[in-house]
Structures are given as C-alpha cells and as structure tokens.
Image (cartoon, rainbow, N blue to C red):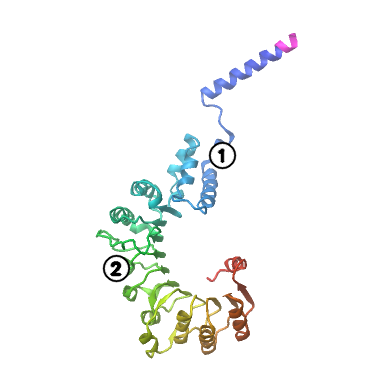
C-alpha cells in the first residue's frame, strides 16, 4: 500500500507539471518545433497534391492547413508562394467568388500568378470577377479562363469592363475555353513572354495574335484560310495542335505556297480536315505525330508532308488499329507507337514538348 501511495503521489506531481506547462504554453506539439521554412516546404508539397483533386476552389487545402492551429494559420497566411501557384476557382460552384478572389490574390504579394478561373454564366458576376482579375494583370503568368457552365443556349459573355490590362509583361501561357478571344487581343499583343496559346473558340481576331513569339499553339473552331495566313509568322513553333476546323471549300481550293515551320517537332490533329493543312506545310524538324479519327485521305496527307519535308518521325500516337497499320507501313523510322487506351500514359511519360 505504501509503495502504491508513493507511486500515486509521483503521478499527481507529474500531472500537475504537465497542466502548468500547458497553461504557460511551454509544452508544444513536436511538429510545432519544426522550423517554419521546413513547414512551408511540407505545405507546398501537400498543396500541390491536394490541388490535383477536383475542387471548385483549390484554396480548400490551404484553409484546412490554416485551421489546425494558430501557428499553422500564421504560416499559411504569410507564405506568398502558397497563394500564387495553380489557384483554381470555379465561380458557379461557390458563393461570392469575387470576394474570395479579392481575399486570395493579394496574399501572393508581387509573385507571378498561375490561375485557372471558371467564370460564371451570369454576365454581371463575370464582369465583377474579370475586373478583379485584371487588377493583377501585371502578375499573370499562366492563365486559363473558361466558362464551364456554358451551353449552346447560354448567352455569350460580352464583357462591359474597360480595365483589361494594357500589357501582360510576365504572361507565358494563356488558355481560353468557350470565351471570345477578341477582347484580349490588344493585351496579348503586349505580352512579350507569351509562349503558349490555347484557344478553343476562334474568330478572325486570331490574325492579330503575336504568333511570332509562340512555341505552342492549340486552335479549335478556326478556318483553314485564317490558319494559313497566321502560320508563316509562327517560325518558333515547336508544338501545333489543331482541333475541329470550320469547313471552307473555297479556302481549301485556293493556291497557297508552302509554309516553312523550321522548329515544329510535334503535330496533333483529330480529323481529316485539319490533317489536310499539312499539305501546305514543310516541317523538317517534325518528330512526333498524334493522330485521331483519320481516314486514308488524312493519313495520305500526312505521309505526303513527311516525304516533302524529309522529316524523321520517331514517335506516333494513333487512335485506331487501321490508322496505326497504315502509318507504320508509311514511316520506316518510327521507334515508338502508342495506341489509344491505356498506353496513353506512356505518351504522357514522354511528353510531346
């Protein structure tokens, strides 16, 4: 009994010491003793992984980290590099997206911004959000703007704001989906660092684009005559992807001199009409082809381009065994072929650029 009472007395003393330490904040969780710079590095990895998951707002991961304790909240809110990279906001899925942007974007300080913004279908809300975004135009580096909720019956957004950035000094990549390119043309012409341009809705405005700086160009819903006017100035292109084009029989029959793209290494197309563009191109550096939904006519156009360009095709991605057979028969230099389906991951492992 005496021994047990002595043990109880010792335990009570230890308990009292622990309670006193907790009250005086002398005892902390071991993770809080990690230096802030190490904690920040861990947070960057955590946020990078969490942003790969689909979320209407990628800042959810930051909010979770910041809600653990006061120390983590202070670290999260004061670290600019956590707020400038791959910020994704789909405005129709969250309330008061404009207010959220006003709170988040300043936390990046003056760092370049990587933004993926899904604009709402409501024109007035879209105007407010674009006004907020344009205030940070000097920091745009990688920008993707879309209208994910838009359907064939949704009115096209025509922004009434007049505060679009006069210049985009650090912009490197710009992507538009379901949005008009016309309103951004004057700004894009003042983007000397622009190297990647992705447009899923085109118009005649593409003729005013500064393609002489581009290394990557992706176009959908364009007309072939417009493209053939544009390409002679795109001498630095390394990757060209062409989606559905607007049929123009008169433009296709028009005589066009061969266009030389000396640095183009990768070409991707998904129909015969865009494959026919290759009949007008000379591509001596072409190495990789990504072909989808092509008939024999489209494949013949590609083989003709490769022959006249004297290019060496080493990698081929094809959709359909028949197309694969025809291409393999035509290109004796091919070393890697990736068919549709599961092998697409191998193409990603050996990216086109």
Quadrant occupied by the N terminus: top right
Q: Determine which residue is flagged by label 1.
A: 34
Bounds of the magenta segment? 1-5
Determine the secondary structure under disc 2: helix
- Image coords of residue 172 (percent x, y): 41, 65
- Give the crowd class for mark 1: few <14, some 14-19, many >=20 residues within 10 Å: few
- Image coords of residue 298 (percent x, y): 51, 83
Looking at the rendered structure, the number of numbered marks drawn on it comes to: 2
Contact? badges 2 and 1 (CB < 8 Å)? no
- Image coords of residue 132 (percent x, y): 31, 53
Which of the two discs, 2 and 1, labels the residue nearer the N terminus? 1
What whole-number distance in Å separates the C-alpha atoms at marks 2 and 1?
A: 49 Å
- Magenta residues: mostly which secondary structure? helix
Q: Quadrant of residue 118?
A: bottom left
Q: Is residue 85 above or below residue 29?
A: below
Q: Is residue 45 magenta?
A: no
Q: Nearer the viewer, residue 190 or 60?
A: 60
Q: Is residue 147 above or below residue 237?
A: above
Residue, x 54% and y 24% (percent of image)? 22
Q: Determine which residue is flagged by label 2.
A: 186
Determine the secondary structure under disc 1: loop
- Give the crowd class for mark 2: few <14, some 14-19, many >=20 residues within 10 Å: some
Q: In the drawing, does residue 6 fall left or right of residue 101? A: right
């Amino acid at each position: 009994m005496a021994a047990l009472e002595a043990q109880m007395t010792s335990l009570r003393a230890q308990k009292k010491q622990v309670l006193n330490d907790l009250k005086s904040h002398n005892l902390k969780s071991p993770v809080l003793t990690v230096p802030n710079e190490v904690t920040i590095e861990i947070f960057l990895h955590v946020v990078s992984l969490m942003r790969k998951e689909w979320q209407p707002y990628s800042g959810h991961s930051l909010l979770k980290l910041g809600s653990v304790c006061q120390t983590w909240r202070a670290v999260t809110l004061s670290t600019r590099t956590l707020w400038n990279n791959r910020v994704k906001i789909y405005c129709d899925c969250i309330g008061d997206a404009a207010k959220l942007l006003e709170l988040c974007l300043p936390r990046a300080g003056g760092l370049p911004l990587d933004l993926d913004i899904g604009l709402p279908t409501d024109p007035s809300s879209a105007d407010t959000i674009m006004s907020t975004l344009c205030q940070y135009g000097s920091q745009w580096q990688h920008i993707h703007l879309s209208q994910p909720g838009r359907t064939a019956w949704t009115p096209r957004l025509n922004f009434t704001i007049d505060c679009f950035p006069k210049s985009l000094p650090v912009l490197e990549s710009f992507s538009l989906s379901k949005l008009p390119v016309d309103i951004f043309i004057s700004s894009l012409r003042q983007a000397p660092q622009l190297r990647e341009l992705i447009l899923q809705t085109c118009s005649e405005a593409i003729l005013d684009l500064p393609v002489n700086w581009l290394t990557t160009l992706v176009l959908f819903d364009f007309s072939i005559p417009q493209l053939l006017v544009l390409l002679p100035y795109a001498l630095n292109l390394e990757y060209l992807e062409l989606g559905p084009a607007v049929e123009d029989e008169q433009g296709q029959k028009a005589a066009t001199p061969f266009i030389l793209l000396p640095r183009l290494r990768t070409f991707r197309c998904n129909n015969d009409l865009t494959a026919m563009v290759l009949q007008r191109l000379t591509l001596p550096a072409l190495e990789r082809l990504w072909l989808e939904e092509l008939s024999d006519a489209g494949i013949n156009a590609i083989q003709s381009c490769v022959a006249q360009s004297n290019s060496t095709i080493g990698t081929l991605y094809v959709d359909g065994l028949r197309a694969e057979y025809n291409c393999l028969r035509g290109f004796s230099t091919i070393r890697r072929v990736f068919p549709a389906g599961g092998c697409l991951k191998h193409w990603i492992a050996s990216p086109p650029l």
